[in-house]
Image (cartoon, helix red, strand yellow):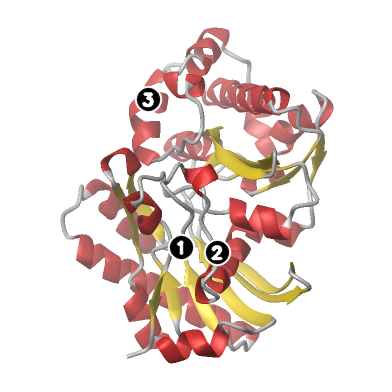
Amino acid sequence: MKSFVQKFKHLNTYKVLGLMSGTSEDGVDLCFANFRIENGKWFYEILEADTLSYSQDELSIIHWAYAGKGTNIQKFDLDYGKVLHSKISQFIEKHTIAPDFICSHGHTIFHQPENGITVQIGNGQFLANELGIPVMADFRSFDVSLGGQGAPLVPIGDELLFSNYDACLNLGGFSNISMNRDGERIAFDISPANLPMNLLVQSETDKHYDKNGDLARTGKVNHDLLNRLNGIEFYQQDPPKSLGQEWLQKEFMPLVPKDLSLNDQLATIIHHIQYQIFKVFDKYNIKNCLVTGGGAKNHYLMEFLTKSGNTEIIIPDDNTVDFKEALVFAFLGILKVRGEVNTLKSVTGASRDSSGGKVFLPG
């Protein structure tokens, strides 16, 4: 471990592979990027990036892990580690790359920070052994042990890589925002985003998601449902705060009437997402906002965000839209190996800033 840290601690450039698997469950995002630091400022270049979709068998591992309620956790951890090993091997062979190290988010199956619990599967030691490359993983648990939410983690990347924007909004399974206010980074989850819509589409069609928001566009807003969604208690809470699968299944999905047409369900949820985001824009007087994540490709939602309100919406290049979170997880590993803060107490509510993540060296 000591020799690993000594090798990488004081470099000015790094080539790192970052992995992200989020609540949307559309696959594993892999981002191989070059990072460099000059005069205390960080720069990045995405060299190669892919999303490798899950097979049905691979998805079943995640779903069984969700349903397991803590049983057989080690088996799921290893089984999903094998899934990641397959994806990483495909990516490395396809692009002929040699990462300095790999930084893996894993896949969150439990997130209950109020109970001191957050679990990401994807066995880091197995990956390091099989790939022969150092792996960093388990980026959330240390912050939770310090009383934090263990999320979001991307804001340190927003602060150091994307500071030229007033705010950064990610539209993944959930929507979350990051901004600097009075010299301090704050961030929090705003609302569900892609996840509930994907679940509804998958339950009623053979599609995985509502491409471009085309189904939602033809639906009608159900104002009774919209009012009930906007009245959820979470939206009255002050940050730091975060959302997870458990909250969605308990608090959000039961409010959506099963006898409402799919298109009307989707249209109403789109309006709900837009309403909650605009509340945040107005509260914090956000002038411009970088928008990334799969939701940035939902044309119907983006029309609402760009044509209404006083905030300039900036959608970057496709690689940044699709792979910003994987990019930042690679960056988290660099900060970890340099012994620098990669998790902010101002964001998570922890007792102090910290440098999260565990290093696994090939055995």
Which mark is first along the chain, 3 or 2? 3
Q: Which mark is residue 251?
A: 3
Q: Secondary structure at mark 3?
A: helix
Q: Quadrant of residue 287?
A: top right
Q: Is residue 348 left or right of residue 277?
A: left
Q: Quadrant of residue 39?
A: bottom right
Q: Which mark is residue 105?
A: 1
Q: Amino acid at mark 3?
A: Glu
Q: Quadrant of residue 113?
A: top left
Which quadrant is the C terminus positioned in?
Answer: bottom left
**81, 15: nearer the viewer:** 15
Disc 1 packing (10 Å; few <14; some 14–19; many ≥20): many
Which mark is first along the chain, 1 or 3? 1
**Residue depicted at 20% across the width and 47% down the height:** 69
**Residue depicted at 79% across the width and 53% down the height:** 316
* C-alpha separation, residue under disc 3 versus residue under disc 1: 26 Å
Give the residue at mark 2: 329
**198, 28: nearer the viewer:** 28
Q: Amino acid at mark 2?
A: Phe
- Can you say whether 105 is above or below 15 in the image? above
Q: Which mark is residue 84?
A: none
Estimate the x, y position of residue 10 in percent, counting from the top left.
61, 83
* C-alpha separation, residue under disc 1 versus residue under disc 2: 7 Å
2 or 3: mark nearer the eye: 2
Which mark is first along the chain, 2 or 1? 1
- Can you say whether 208 is above or below 201 in the image? below
Disc 2 packing (10 Å; few <14; some 14–19; many ≥20): many
Estimate the x, y position of residue 187 in percent, counting from the top left.
58, 41
Judge whether residue 270 can be spotted in this image: yes
Estimate the x, y position of residue 139 in percent, counting from the top left.
43, 61
